[in-house]
């Protein structure tokens, strides 16, 4: 049976993107695998679910944060190719990263080799430092938002500000004044400690 949200997405952007199957779902977004018809490349399309998309304020915040993140160009940040809203469907199009995420990796391997953990921490820190120099704060850094490239294993940060933008739109969280806003970090303490104090220190300094 066709899924209603999938049908709405196809109706809204199907001329430009061949929307395939759902590949991810959370409380704040649904992700589809798709093909860019014009450029003939696979992409991932993230859209707001119906229970949030009805609110114009949430759609506006979602789109604005995605547009800000789209200005970032870094080897360890998932690139955003397109941002838009049509027929009530707020979405953004990003690179399709097929290696899973850090949360899945840690579930399989809670204590990865120190060298691998150091490398990923350095890559994540480099990405966040680059974003900070451009005035962009992630606000929700956690293993689920660290995607892994299937070919190289490199860490790629995604969802800059998206979750917090939605929460602000629903009124579920008060972001406070700018001076009080700090990026939230949910990286596993056990995993970080496995990299040793030297690795953690070098990552922070990055």
Image (cartoon, grey):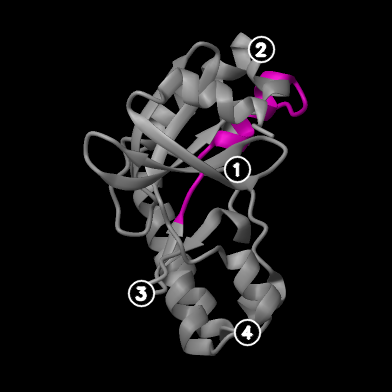
Q: In x, y percent, where is residue 78?
A: 39, 50
Residue shown at 65% from the left, 85% from the top: 111
Q: Are there few (<14), some (14-19), or many (20+) residues within 10 Å of tag 1?
A: few
Work out whether 103 lies above or below 160.
below
Q: Which residue is mark 2?
A: 55
Q: Are there few (<14), some (14-19), or many (20+) residues within 10 Å of tag 3?
A: few
- C-alpha span from label 1 to label 3: 31 Å
Span shown in magenta: 157-174
Does label 2 or label 3 sit earlier along the sequence? 2
Which mark's residue is nearer the viewer, 1 or 3? 3
Does label 1 or label 4 sit earlier along the sequence? 1
Residue shown at 73% from the left, 22% from the top: 51
Of helix, strand and loop, which one carries label 4? loop
Which mark's residue is nearer the viewer, 1 or 4? 4
Work out whether 115 lies above or below 146.
below
Q: Which residue is mark 3?
A: 152
- C-alpha span from label 2 to label 1: 26 Å
Which mark's residue is nearer the viewer, 2 or 1? 2
On the question of residue 175 being in view, the answer is no
Q: Which residue is mark 1?
A: 182
Q: Does the magenta-highlighted stretch encompass residue 164?
A: yes
Q: Are there few (<14), some (14-19), or many (20+) residues within 10 Å of tag 4?
A: some
- C-alpha span from label 1 to label 4: 25 Å
Residue shown at 69% from the left, 34% from the top: 1
- C-alpha span from label 2 to label 4: 43 Å
Residue shown at 43% from the left, 38% from the top: 136
Q: Which residue is mark 4?
A: 194
């Amino acid at each position: 049976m066709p899924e209603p949200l999938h049908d709405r997405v196809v109706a809204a952007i199907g001329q430009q993107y061949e929307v395939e199957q759902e590949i991810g779902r959370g409380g704040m977004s649904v992700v589809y695998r798709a093909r860019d018809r014009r450029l003939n490349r696979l992409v991932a399309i993230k859209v707001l679910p119906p229970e949030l998309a009805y609110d114009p304020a949430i759609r506006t915040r979602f789109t604005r944060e995605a547009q800000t993140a789209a200005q970032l160009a870094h080897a360890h940040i998932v690139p955003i190719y397109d941002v838009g809203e049509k027929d009530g469907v707020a979405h953004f199009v990003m690179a399709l990263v097929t290696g899973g995420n850090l949360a899945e990796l840690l579930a399989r391997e809670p204590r990865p080799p120190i060298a691998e953990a150091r490398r990923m921490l350095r890559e994540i820190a480099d990405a966040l430092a680059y974003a900070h120099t451009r005035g962009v704060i992630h606000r929700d850094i956690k293993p689920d938002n660290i995607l892994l490239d299937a070919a190289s294993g490199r860490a790629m940060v995604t969802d800059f500000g998206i979750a917090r933008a939605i929460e602000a739109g629903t009124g579920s969280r008060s972001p406070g004044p700018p001076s009080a806003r700090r990026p939230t970090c949910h990286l596993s303490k056990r995993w970080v400690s496995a990299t040793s104090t030297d690795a953690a220190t070098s990552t922070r300094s990055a």
